[in-house]
Image (cartoon, rainbow, N blue to C red):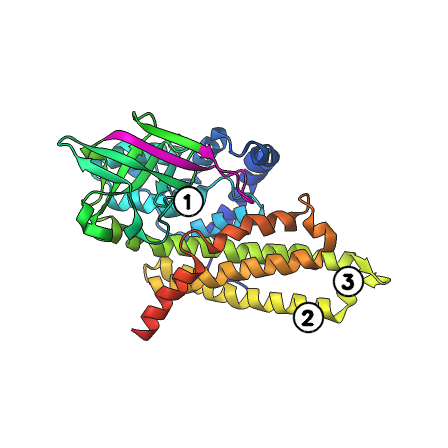
Amino acid sequence: MKRKIFAPEHEEFRATVRSFLAKEVLPYYEQWEKAGIVSRDAWRAAGKQGLLGFAVPQEYGGGGTPDFRYSAVLAEEFTRAGAPGLALGLHNDIIGPYLTGLATEEQKRRWLPGFCDGTLITAIAMTEPGAGSDLQGIRTHAEDRGDHWLLNGSKTFISSGILADLVIVVAKTTPEGGAHGLSLLVVERGMDGFERGRNLDKIGQKAQDTAELFFHDVRVPKENLLGDLNGAFAHLMTNLAQERLSIAVSGIAAAEHVLELTTEYVKEREAFGRPLAGLQHIRFEIAEMATECAVTRTFLDRCIEDHARGELDAVHASMGKWWATELQKRVADRCLQLHGGYGYMAEYPVARAFTDGRIQTIYGGTTEIMKEIIGRAVLG
């Protein structure tokens, strides 16, 4: 089915993204995978190309357009290229709204220009060794010391944790407040007591640095409080719909792409004297996956349109996230199976799609959490 959600300017932007990938990303990606981290030069190149800060007002160096369809194009093209390591979606779609929506005028002028030109890489630190989806379990805490907060604690599984120059940390500022006693504190590179641990060794997305972070008596200036004191829970809930939609968009793009690769493979690969595509079982497998992708794409395109109009709610974002990422996982597994032994070889794109995509049903809220959100809304 022909997609109808993009205007000519979005397709022009798609061509720009593909050119950027061909020039600044793909020639270096294998090197980044081995190093476990991407080059900061790539971030600066992305800034020069206008791939950072779409929704940031032009006065701070951004694109000045909140149209999420540009983010969708970026996510689709990076996914099709098999290059999730340069985490522009995390920077733009997940962290960007916190800075544009919550920052004071002084904070915007201090942080947003670097956010847009690629000299200031961002991360958000929620997850801890003992607390993931349950925010009430967060132990990282900050004491009010008059002119600053004294921050102590640790975080783990933090995407861009090694490269990040600015980290939005979820910390407990009112001990008895539970989930409603949390605040967002911005920790900057070079602050005394802020240390980075291991660049964690993951099974996939190896070019994207994921780290442990430690805070030992870090003096965070009062002017680095982001949003309202004890308002982190509400702030986090406000921005989750876009985060989950962004993950869902990359999920369906990944499923479609690995299916395309597999469709070509079964046409060429022979077994028992004829192409695999000549076997009814293979045709049925391809037919099932193609149908699932088409139906999912239709729903997500509607979600993209709704979000571009400011109408996407948390329930439909959760539906899109769990369904698209579970589909991605299922399609990658079935396509690997259809590749036989070659699918298990790291040099084949289907193998990387299998390992890179496995995290999708976990971060941004697990599938189980998505179902809980939907179930509560349906049942009241």
Outermost residue to the bottom: 379
Find residue 327 and report its horizontal and vertical position in percent. 54, 62
> Along the horizontal axis of the image, is 51 left or right of 35?
left
Residue at the disc numbered 2: 284
Q: Amino acid at mark 2?
A: Phe
Residue drawn where x is 30% and y is 45% of the image: 98
Q: CA distance from mark 2 to mark 3?
A: 12 Å
Residue 370 in sight from this viewpoint: yes
Q: Is residue 48 visible?
A: no
Mark count: 3
Q: Earlier in the sequence, mark 1 or mark 2?
A: 1
Q: Amino acid at mark 3?
A: Leu
Mark 3 vs 1, N-terminal side: 1
Segment tinted magenta in the rendering: 198-219
Which quadrant of the rendered structure holds the N terminus?
bottom right
| Residue placed under numbered mark 3 in the picture | 276
- Residue 2 falls left or right of residue 225: right
- Which one is nearer the viewer's eye here, 218 or 354? 218
Name the residue that disc number 1 marks. 90
Residue at 78% from the left image edge and 67% from the top image edge: 278
Q: Is residue 214 magenta?
A: yes
Q: Residues within 10 Å of mark 3 (few under 14, many from 20)?
A: many
Q: Quadrant of residue 335?
A: bottom right
Mark pair 1, 2: CA separation: 36 Å
